[in-house]
Amino acid sequence: MLNIKNLFKRVTFLFLPIFLFAGTLTAQSGSVKYVYTIDYPMGGKAAYLDWVKSIISALQKPDELISLASYDNYFNETPERVVEFEFANNLDAAKYFDNPEIGNVVEQVVDHGITRGVFVLHKRGDYNPGENKRGNIKYVFTLDYGVGNRTAYLEMVKTVVKTLQIPKEVKRITSYDNYFNSSPNRVIEFEFASMEDAVKYFEMPQIKDIVETSVNMSINHKMNVLRLRGDYNKN
């Protein structure tokens, strides 16, 4: 039976040569984000967070890394923790994760927590950048376009961008494509200063209508609500 630690290493580092090779063929604009989803060990959250303090310097040091942030699931559901690494391009991402010091930290993750998945995302230009500062609350929607429906879905998005961005409650909206075209195909993040603002925003009739349209035009919808942690300061 394949050891879970070896499996995680294999999955994570299998991405790197593919990712690097793709970058040599097609230059990518915008940012690339690696998203790690993790559960804390049963009764071991405090110990996990103490360990995190010991790796902060190593993770934040490389110049290739633009931003690093961690979140807890607002409702303590799986995944309980989300860690996001952001880069200017895929070559920087590959160089970062190929760094032996970073590789050593990644290997240790499975010894301290329960890794649920690693996703590689490429930022789209559907929405204006919004505020540079991260929101304390983030709603993350994931979906698949459905067979042959990607173009129609993205055309629909163009018609709702303004409506989604107008309310003052939402600080930033960002959309991503899955770099490897696997599921989920698309990720949309809505950031807010508080949960009160988030609830108010999604209760607006015009926002509800757009969410319903999105659900009707796509498949495999999921949503996570995240709370920003203060583990890292490279934001």
Image (cartoon, grey):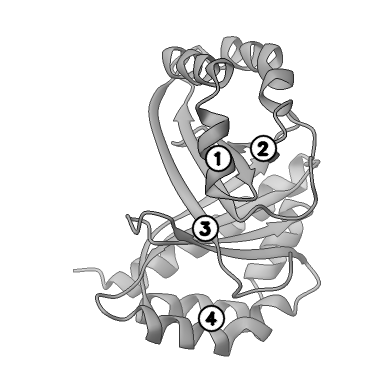
> Nearer the viewer's eye, disc 3 or disc 4?
3
Q: Looking at the image, is mark 3 or mark 4 earlier in the sequence?
A: 4
Disc 4 secondary structure class: helix
Disc 3 secondary structure class: strand
227 relative to 50, above or below? above
**Residue 96, position in %: x, y?**
69, 69
What is the CA distance from the residue labelled 1 to the residue labelled 4? Answer: 34 Å
Q: Quadrant of the C terminus?
A: bottom right
**Residue 86, position in %: x, y?**
69, 57
Q: Residue at 51% of width from left, 42% of height from top?
A: 140
Query: Dots 2 and 1: beta carbons under 8 Å?
Result: yes
Q: Residue at 36% of width from left, 78% of height from top?
A: 45
> Nearer the viewer's eye, disc 2 or disc 3?
2
Mark 1 — residue?
198
Q: Residues within 10 Å of mark 4 (few under 14, many from 20)?
A: some
Q: Amino acid at mark 3?
A: Arg
Q: Looking at the image, is mark 2 or mark 3 earlier in the sequence?
A: 2
Mark 3 — residue?
227
Q: Residues within 10 Å of mark 1 (few under 14, many from 20)?
A: many
Q: Is residue 178 visible?
A: no
What is the CA distance from the residue labelled 4 to the residue labelled 2? Answer: 37 Å
Q: Looking at the image, is mark 4 or mark 2 earlier in the sequence?
A: 4
**Residue 212, position in %: x, y?**
45, 16
Q: Looking at the image, is mark 1 or mark 4 earlier in the sequence?
A: 4
**Residue 44, position in %: x, y?**
31, 81
Mark 2 — residue?
169
Residue 154, picture quadrant = top right
